[in-house]
Image (cartoon, rainbow, N blue to C red):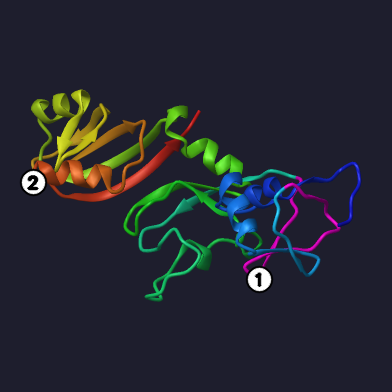
Amino acid sequence: MKNNKNSERISKVIARSSQYSRRQVEQLIIEGRVKIDGKIIDRPNINVNSLNKILLDKKVIDYKTNDEIFIFNKPRGCLVTHSDPEGRKTIFNIIPKKFEKYISIGRLDYNSEGLLLLTNNGDIKRYFELPKNNFERSYKVKVQGKIDDKIIKSLKKGLFINKIKYKPIIALVESSTPTYTWIIMTLREGKNREIRNIFESFNMTVTRLIRISYGP
């Protein structure tokens, strides 16, 4: 392997440029799924640099030295994934081509919109998503019907729905009419369809869900 003073451990390089953790990368190496300069490697304690050609499952791994975060305003009607077996539109059909290898920090579902962060560094992705880092995510939500004080108190206390515990949520009604309510909600966790599931438990339907902030 080519080596110089700027070399780094192979597991670190792949983790930085993929969705895998360093420990997962080490397992992939043991399984023989990584090549350096055309040769399969079977041990993770190998250093590489920008001159080496790195393949993971036949896909080229970029040796990145600059960490970047791309801020994207996701529209409704697309998935946060690189490809969809059903052929639905994804964010990578929309964003500039130079960001096509970036990975998302968290997700927004098909009909949700707003702030989405993408990065070229898997370590940054994991840092934002790690529950112990307790990053806030804020959403502007339109709900059919009127949200009363009882619902607001339930949100602030936290809820159990279908044996799933949802942590307390900061909730502030922004505006309301007899037919709908706009509410700002701030969460410190990212459970799948959390906001939609919570309002469904009150027999209410979310008609718009817009993320407006994530992290510090």
The residue under label 1 is 58
- The image position of residue 82, as x and y in percent, is 50, 64
Position of 146 with respect to 55 (left or right) is: left
Of residue 119 and residue 10, the one placed in the foreground of this image is: 10
Q: Residue at x 36, y 31 (%)?
A: 188
Exactly how many numbered labels are in the figure?
A: 2
Q: Amino acid at mark 2?
A: Asn
In this picture, is 34 found above or below 87?
Answer: above
Location of the N terminus by quadrant is: bottom right
The answer to whether any part of residue 120 appears in the image is: no
Any magenta on residue 190? no
The residue under label 2 is 203
Q: Which marked residue is nearer to the observer: mark 1 or mark 2? A: 1
The residue range painted magenta reads 45-65
- The image position of residue 148, as x and y in percent, is 9, 30
Q: Amino acid at mark 1?
A: Lys
